[in-house]
Image (cartoon, rainbow, N blue to C red):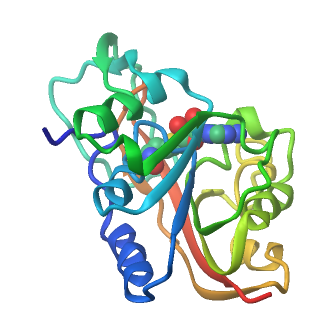
Amino acid sequence: MKTKSIWGNPPKRLYKLLNILKSENRENVEICIVGCSDGKFLMPFARAGIKVTGYDIDEIALYGGEKLFPIKEVNIKYEFNTKFKSKDFPLEKRRVYGVCERLHLENLESFANVKLLDFYKNTPSDSFDLVFTSCSLHYSKNAEYSLQDKVQKLGSIVKKGGYLYLDYMMAIVEDDYENFPESKFFRKGQIKNMLSDCFEIIYNKENFNPSFEGAHVDCVKDHFHRFGYIFARRIK
Ligand SMILES: C[S@@+](CC[C@H](N)C(=O)[O-])C[C@H]1O[C@@H](n2cnc3c(N)ncnc32)[C@H](O)[C@@H]1O
């Protein structure tokens, strides 16, 4: 039985990373997904027979349970406008699968090691061929650490010759530190300087225009995000 993440399907760039690792014919490859949630980015590695570790602080995303979803009759996609205001959508509870349930249903448990762990607070000492995180850095839970600290913690568990992939939220208004605090939102060009000289950057893309995201699980409003992506290799 093939299962699905509540966050939709992974983007093509995930499969590009997977193919890079496959093409290098490494032995005993190990991947780490920090903030693995219900497995959107973890399941493709397990399905490819690659050993993957996932950490998250969200028990329901790991083990299953009920989450709140917005009730929307129509989905309208808005263009960005600084004055945009969304209504609060009413919420309803729905049962969702956790990543552990998904692994079980797809008979993939032997490829994955999933742990309830606050990664930035209790950074493990294991090391991996690829460390991947998608939008975990900005969580309020992590606001006590600077972005630099968080990036360094992620980098610390990459093996020499391994890769680090991060996608991250950027400030929509660069000089608005009240709504886009520095501990949560990157400014243009900032992340490059946070990686130590142990890393060589393969690409770093930062969107200029905010993209629309409809109200989703645990979020009652339609809203906009501005994203950045960085992919780097540990050279020493
Ligand atoms: C935005 S969600 C990822 C959702 C989905 N995979 C996607 O990007 O479409 C980020 C995940 O990071 C997790 N997270 C945030 N801070 C964390 C921390 N300190 N340690 C472990 N997981 C964390 C959250 O619980 C959440 O499940």
What count of labels does the image hold? 0
Of the four image quadrants, the one with ligand 1 is top right
Residue 162 position (above or below residue 176): below
**Is residue 135 shown left or right of residue 78?**
right
Q: Splitting the image into 4 quarters, where does residue 157 fall?
A: bottom right
Quadrant holding the C terminus: bottom right
Q: Splitting the image into 4 quarters, where does residue 229 fall?
A: bottom right
Residue 230 position (above or below residue 123): below
Question: Looking at the picture, how far across and down is residue 90, in whole percent?
Answer: 34, 12
Nearer to us in this view, 233 or 171: 233
Q: Splitting the image into 4 quarters, where does residue 80 fall?
A: bottom left
Residue 215 position (above or below residue 89): below
Question: Looking at the picture, how far across and down is residue 95, in whole percent?
Answer: 29, 15
Question: Looking at the picture, how far across and down is residue 204, in whole percent?
Answer: 59, 81
Whether residue 224 can be seen here: yes
Residue at image position (20%, 36%) is: 75
Quadrant holding the N terminus: top left
Question: Looking at the picture, how far across and down is residue 149, in whole percent?
Answer: 86, 57
Nearer to us in this view, 176 or 143: 143
Residue at image position (53%, 62%) is: 31
Residue at image position (35%, 79%) is: 19
Nearer to us in this view, 74 or 112: 112
**Is residue 75 shown left or right of residue 172?**
left
Whether residue 83 can be seen here: no
Nearer to us in this view, 86 or 180: 180
Residue at image position (49%, 82%) is: 26
